[in-house]
Image: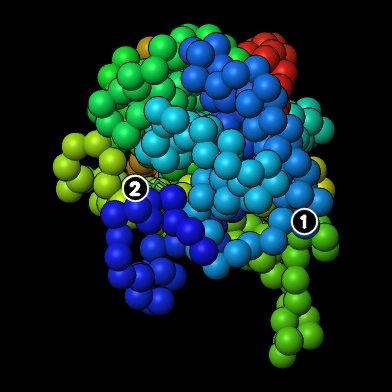
C-alpha cells in the first residue's frame, strides 16, 4: 500500500494507529461529492494549463469509472485507504496509471474535505427540507380536518382556557416554519466554495475559483484560505438547526404522548405508529413519539460535541476536524427518520372530540366571566376578584360555576344578570379570541390561509432541491 504522504517516512505506521487515523469507514459516504469535486477540479486545472486536454479527459473518465464502482457497490477497499480522498485517488491510479498523480496538483485534502462536506450538506439539507415541508403539509391537513374541535388549553399542565385543536396543530406549523427559515439560512451560508485554498495558504496555480465555484454550483468563493480550511460553521449551524427542530418535535410528541393516555384520551396514535408490550397484553404504547422525544437527546449531544471539538483548535486545519463527520451524518440520518415518522403520526392521528369536550370545565371560563363583568363597567382587577370569590363559593358548595344561583352571583356583584348564562359556552369563549393570532374561528381561518400561502412560497425558495450530482 502507498500513502499519499509516504515520501518523507521511513518507518511504517503502527497498526492500531492506522485504524485510529482512518476515516474511510465513515467518510466513504462522501464518494459522490469527492468525485464530483475532483471532476470539477480537473477541469479547473486544465483551464489553468496544468493538465493537457488529454490528461484531463483521462482523469475525468477514470473518476467516472470509480464513481460507477461505488454506485454499483463494487468498489473494493484496500488496506491503506485512509479516507475517501485517498481511496478514490488510489483507485484512479490503478485504472489510468501515473497521470492520476497530477490531479492533486495545488490541492490539499484540507480544501478538498471542506468542499466535499459542503456539497454533501447541500444535498442532504435539501432532502431534509422537503421532508420538513411534508410535515408542515400534514399539520395543515390535520388542522383543516378538525377545524372547530375545542379542547382544554393548558399552562403549567393545568386547564387554562378553551382552544381549538386546529390552533394547537398550527402552533407547531409556525415553529417548523422558523426551522425552515433557519435551514435556508444555513444552506445559503454553506453555499461558498473552499476549493482552491490549498492546505492553508492558497494555491499558486492560475485557478479561476469563480469559474470552479459555478462549475460546482456554489454561489460564492471563500475569501480567506486560512478561514476556508478551518471553517466548520455550516456543520455547527446544521446541527444547531437540527437540535432546535428536534426540540420542537419532542415538545409536540410530549403533548401527544400525554393526550394518548387513558387519563386524557384526547387522541389515539394509529397502530402503524404504536407498539405493544411483551408482558402486558393490553398495552399499546406510542413508541413513535417517545423515540422522537428520545432521539432529541442524541441530536443535542452531537451539537454540543462538535462545538467542544471546535473550541480549542488553533488556526487552520487540525485532525480534530475529522471528528465533524460522524455527528453530522448521524444527525442527518436521525432527522431523515424523525420528521417523516412525525408526519405519519399526524397523518394517521385519531382525534377524539368527545373526550376533549368532556375535559372542558366551567373553571376554564373564569376569564370570560371576568370579561363579562368588565363589559358591565367593572375594572378588570375587581372583576378578577369577584370571579375568584365565585370559584371559591362554587368549590365550597361542591357545584360547577354554572351551578351557582343568580342570587349567589348577585351576593358577590350586583352587575351579574341572567344573561350571564350565555358565558357558559366553551365554543363562545374560543370564538371571542378573534384578534389576529387568537383561537377564534375567523382568526384561525386567517391563520390557515397565511400558513397555506407561506407553504406554497417556501416550496420554491430553494431551487427545486436540485441535486448537485
Ligand atoms: N480525513 C480527513 C478529514 O476528514 C481529510 C483531511 C485530511 N487532511 C490532512 N491534512 N490530514 O478531515
Q: Is residue 460 toward the left or the right of residue 171 in the image?
A: right
Q: How is the image coloured?
A: rainbow
The front one of 212 and 281 is 212
Which is more toward the observer, 351 or 24?
24
Q: Residue at horizontal 58%, vertical 42%?
A: 98
Q: At 63% from the left edge and 58% from the top edge, which residue is drawn? A: 289
State which tag comes first along the sequence, 1 or 2.
Answer: 1
Residue at the extreme bottom of the image, as rendered: 279
Mark 2: give few (<14), some (14-19) or many (20+) Cα within 10 Å: many
At a point 53% along the width and 59% down the height, the residue shown is 81
Distance in Å between CA atoms under marks 1 and 2: 28 Å
SS type, badge 2: helix
- The residue that mark 2 highlights is 321
The answer to whether residue 1 is above or below residue 457 is below
Q: Toward which corner of the image does residue 62 lie, by quadrant?
A: top right
Q: Could you say which quadrant of the image residue 56 lies in?
A: top right
**Quadrant position of residue 8:** bottom left
Image position of 372 with respect to 250: above or below: above
Q: Quadrant of the C terminus?
A: top right
Task: In the rendered structure, find residue 73 and report the number of the disc placed on it.
Answer: 1
Q: In the figure, is residue 82 to the left or right of 341?
A: left
Q: Position of residue 153 (x, y in %)?
A: 54, 41
Foreground residue among 401 and 80: 80
Amino acid at each position: 500500500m502507498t500513502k499519499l504522504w509516504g515520501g518523507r517516512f521511513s518507518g511504517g505506521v503502527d497498526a492500531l494507529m492506522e485504524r485510529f487515523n482512518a476515516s474511510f469507514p465513515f467518510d466513504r459516504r462522501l464518494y459522490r461529492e469527492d468525485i464530483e469535486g475532483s471532476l470539477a477540479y480537473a477541469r479547473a486545472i486544465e483551464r489553468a494549463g496544468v493538465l493537457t486536454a488529454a490528461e484531463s479527459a483521462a482523469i475525468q473518465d477514470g473518476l467516472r469509472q470509480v464513481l460507477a464502482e461505488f454506485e454499483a457497490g463494487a468498489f473494493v477497499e484496500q488496506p491503506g485507504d485512509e479516507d475517501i480522498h485517498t481511496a478514490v485517488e488510489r483507485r484512479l491510479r490503478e485504472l489510468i496509471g501515473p497521470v492520476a498523480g497530477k490531479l492533486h496538483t495545488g490541492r490539499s485534502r484540507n480544501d478538498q474535505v471542506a468542499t466535499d462536506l459542503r456539497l454533501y450538506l447541500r444535498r442532504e439539507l435539501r432532502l431534509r427540507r422537503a421532508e420538513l415541508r411534508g410535515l408542515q403539509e400534514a399539520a395543515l391537513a390535520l388542522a383543516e380536518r378538525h377545524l372547530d374541535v375545542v379542547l382544554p388549553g393548558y399552562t403549567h399542565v393545568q386547564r387554562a382556557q378553551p382552544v381549538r385543536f386546529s390552533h394547537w396543530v398550527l402552533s407547531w406549523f409556525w415553529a417548523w416554519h422558523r426551522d425552515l427559515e433557519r435551514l435556508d439560512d444555513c444552506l445559503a451560508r454553506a453555499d461558498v466554495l473552499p476549493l482552491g485554498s490549498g492546505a492553508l495558504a492558497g494555491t499558486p496555480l492560475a485557478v479561476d475559483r469563480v469559474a470552479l465555484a459555478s462549475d460546482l454550483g456554489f454561489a460564492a468563493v471563500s475569501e480567506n484560505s486560512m478561514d476556508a480550511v478551518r471553517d466548520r460553521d455550516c456543520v455547527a449551524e446544521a446541527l444547531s438547526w437540527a437540535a432546535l427542530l428536534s426540540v420542537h418535535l419532542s415538545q409536540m410528541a410530549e403533548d401527544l404522548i400525554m393526550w394518548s393516555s387513558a387519563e386524557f384520551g384526547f387522541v389515539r396514535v394509529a397502530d402503524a405508529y404504536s407498539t405493544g408490550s411483551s408482558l402486558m397484553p393490553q398495552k399499546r404504547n406510542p413508541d413513535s413519539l417517545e423515540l422522537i422525544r428520545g432521539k432529541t437527546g442524541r441530536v443535542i449531544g452531537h451539537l454540543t460535541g462538535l462545538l467542544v471539538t471546535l473550541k480549542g483548535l488553533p488556526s487552520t486545519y487540525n485532525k480534530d476536524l475529522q471528528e465533524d463527520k460522524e455527528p453530522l451524518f448521524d444527525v442527518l440520518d436521525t432527522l431523515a427518520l424523525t420528521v417523516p415518522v412525525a408526519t405519519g403520526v399526524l397523518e394517521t392521528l385519531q382525534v377524539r372530540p368527545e373526550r376533549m369536550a368532556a375535559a372542558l370545565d366551567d373553571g376554564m371560563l373564569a376569564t370570560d366571566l371576568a370579561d363579562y363583568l368588565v363589559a358591565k363597567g367593572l375594572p378588570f382587577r375587581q372583576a378578577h376578584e369577584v370571579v375568584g370569590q365565585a370559584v371559591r363559593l362554587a368549590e365550597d358548595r361542591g357545584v360547577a360555576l354554572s351551578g351557582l344561583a343568580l342570587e349567589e352571583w348577585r351576593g358577590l356583584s350586583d352587575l351579574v344578570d341572567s344573561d350571564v348564562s350565555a358565558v357558559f359556552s366553551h365554543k363562545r369563549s374560543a370564538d371571542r379570541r378573534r384578534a389576529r393570532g387568537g383561537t377564534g374561528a375567523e382568526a384561525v381561518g386567517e391563520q390557515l390561509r397565511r400558513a397555506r400561502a407561506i407553504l406554497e412560497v417556501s416550496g420554491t425558495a430553494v431551487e427545486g432541491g436540485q441535486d448537485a450530482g
